[in-house]
C-alpha cells in the first residue's frame, strides 16, 4: 500500500484518518494543504476516483468568497489554486481515493 493523506493538521476528520492508519501500523505520507496543494496529475487521479464536484468543500469561507456557487466552468483550475477548498481528508492509495473518514473502505485496501 502507498497511502497518502491530504488534509489540514487542525481538521478533526484528517486527524482521525491519521490515527486510523497509525493504530494499524500502516505507513502513510501526510500532505498539508496549508503548505502545498494537489498537483495537476494528483487531481486528475483523485477526480477519476471520486468526481470533481465531491472534492469541493461548500462550507468553507473561500467557497463563498469566490462565489463558487455560481461558477461551474474552470473548477479544476480554481481548486488547483485554492487548496483550502478541498473536502478533507482525501486519502489515496494509488489510483483509488476516498474523501472524509471512510474506514470501511480502507479495510478493503490491504
Image (cartoon, rainbow, N blue to C red):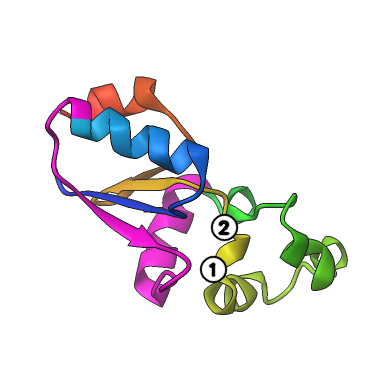
Number of other residues with Cα within 10 Å of mark 1, as a class: few under 14, some 14 to 19, many 20 or more: some
Give the quarter of the figure containing the C terminus.
top left
Task: Tell me: 74 left or right of 9.
Answer: right
Task: Tell me: 103 left or right of 79.
Answer: left
Q: Which residue is rendered at x = 46% and y = 65% of the image?
A: 33
Locate residue 29, reporting x and y percent. Answer: 22, 54
| Residue 99 can be seen, yes or no | no
Would residue 31 appear left or right of 75 to someone viewing this image? left
**How far is mark 1 from mark 2, CA to CA?**
6 Å
Q: Secondary structure at mark 2?
A: loop
> Residue 54, position in %: x, y?
61, 48
Q: Residue at x 62, y 62 (%)?
A: 85
Q: Which mark is residue 86?
A: 2
The reply, left or right, for residue 107 in relation to residue 68 is left
Disc 1 secondary structure class: helix
Quarter of the picture holding the N terminus: top left
Q: Quadrant of residue 15?
A: top left
Q: Are marks 1 and 2 in contact (CB under 8 Å)?
A: yes
The residue stretch that appears in magenta: 23-50
Task: Give the image location of residue 79, x and y in percent.
Answer: 59, 70
In the picture of the structure, the residue carrying the numbered disc 1 is 83
**Residue at point 47%, 55% (across, down):** 8
Does residue 46 show up magenta in the picture?
yes
- Vertical side of 78 occupied by 107: above or below: above
Amino acid at each position: 500500500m502507498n497511502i497518502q493523506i491530504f488534509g489540514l493538521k487542525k481538521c478533526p476528520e484528517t486527524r482521525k484518518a491519521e490515527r486510523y492508519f497509525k493504530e494499524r501500523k500502516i505507513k502513510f505520507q501526510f500532505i498539508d494543504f496549508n503548505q502545498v496543494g494537489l498537483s495537476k496529475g494528483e487531481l486528475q487521479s483523485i477526480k477519476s476516483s471520486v468526481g470533481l464536484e465531491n472534492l469541493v468543500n461548500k462550507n468553507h469561507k473561500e467557497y463563498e468568497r469566490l462565489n463558487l456557487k455560481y461558477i461551474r466552468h474552470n473548477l479544476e483550475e480554481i481548486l488547483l489554486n485554492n487548496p483550502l477548498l478541498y473536502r478533507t481528508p482525501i486519502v489515496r492509495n494509488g489510483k483509488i481515493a476516498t474523501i472524509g473518514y471512510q474506514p470501511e473502505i480502507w479495510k478493503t485496501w490491504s
